[in-house]
Image (cartoon, rainbow, N blue to C red):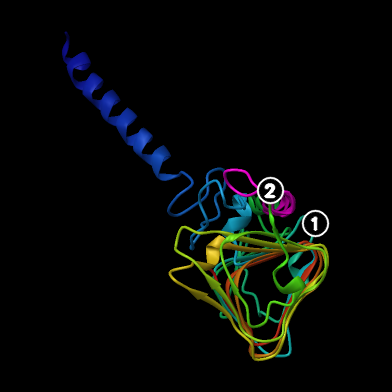
Amino acid sequence: MNRFDSISKPLMWSTTILLAAIVAGCGGNGDGVLGTTISQPGTVCTGASCVNLGTAGNYAILANTGIDTAPGASVITGNIATGPGVTSTAITGFALNLPAASPYATSTQVSGKVYAFDYAPPTPAEVNTASLDMGTAYTAAVNMAPAGGGLTTACPGVGALGGLTISPGVYNCSVAISIATDVTLSGSATDVWVIRTTQGLDQATATTVHLIGGALPQNVFWQAAGAVTVGSTAHFEGIILGQTAITFGNASSINGRVLAQTAVNLDMTTVTQP
């Protein structure tokens, strides 16, 4: 073996190991979702019972047509984004700061980053993929079957959830869901809820969705074909998969994600990604 071989071979092995470590560090857990450069500051549901959000899970708010906070400023923990072809002009009330040629903007109201279709690459492709993943997640929730087989459970309270304690499971509602008084979801940190309706969801003013027993907001999925409205000062828990608009009233809050195929409207709302 000549001197060059004795030096170059260990260097080649070291380089190979380093590259492997870098690739491994860019996987689906930790700082980002595989296949995207947008970081995921929160956590998502994992396991066969979960609704797979794909890259839509990188956002606290993802809205295909626009995000508005008016008249009051909101507080968002996590990233926010609009969908394919929708420019940053559809993100209103956030006083965005966009550096030249940047793929994202910032806002004093958002702890993460703000993404829009008119920002620098790779953002246009990223938001397009996230929007597609959001639609796929919505459809998956619609068609979700309980883990291990069996039948889905009838709509709790025939859609009137106020005052109920709901166990983990997959629930079907063909009527609008109403939360007129507090509702409780009781289960462990590994339990999953999928509550779906072919209509809308309305939560009354000053009511709360409670999680007890270790239940986690990233494991609770609310799929609604109609409009979703969370009343003023109300508190919500879970992932909202809305086919139409999602509106939060004044001083309302959510621990979860807000994923809308149309618009998201906020008013001094606190959105905290799990």
Q: Secondary structure at mark 2?
A: helix
Name the residue nearer the viewer: 183 or 33: 183
Residue 254 covered by magenta stretch: no
**How many residues crowd mark 2 within 10 Å: few (<14), some (14–19), many (20+)?**
some
Q: Position of residue 116 (x, y in %)?
A: 70, 62
Specify the quadrant that holds the N terminus: top left
The answer to whether residue 187 is seen in the rendering is: yes
Q: Which residues are magenta?
A: 127-150
Residue 138 covered by magenta stretch: yes
* Residue where numbered disc 2 is placed: 129
Q: Are marks 1 and 2 in contact (CB under 8 Å)?
A: no
* Amino acid type shown at disc 2: Thr
**Is the stretch drawn in magenta largely helix, strand or loop?**
helix
The answer to whether residue 91 is seen in the rendering is: no
Q: Is 245 on the left or on the right of 11, as rendered?
A: right
* Residue where numbered disc 1 is placed: 85
**How many residues crowd mark 1 within 10 Å: few (<14), some (14–19), many (20+)?**
some
Q: Position of residue 100 (x, y in %)?
A: 62, 63
> Splitting the image into 4 quarters, where does residue 159 fall?
bottom right
Q: Using the numbered discs, state the Cα–Cα distance from disc 1 to disc 2 in whole angstroms.
A: 12 Å
At x 69% / y 69%, what residue is drawn? 156
> Splitting the image into 4 quarters, where does residue 200 fall?
bottom right
Q: Secondary structure at mark 1?
A: loop
Q: What is the residue that sits farthest to the top in this orientation?
A: 1
* Amino acid type shown at disc 1: Gly
At x 43% / y 69%, what residue is drawn? 214
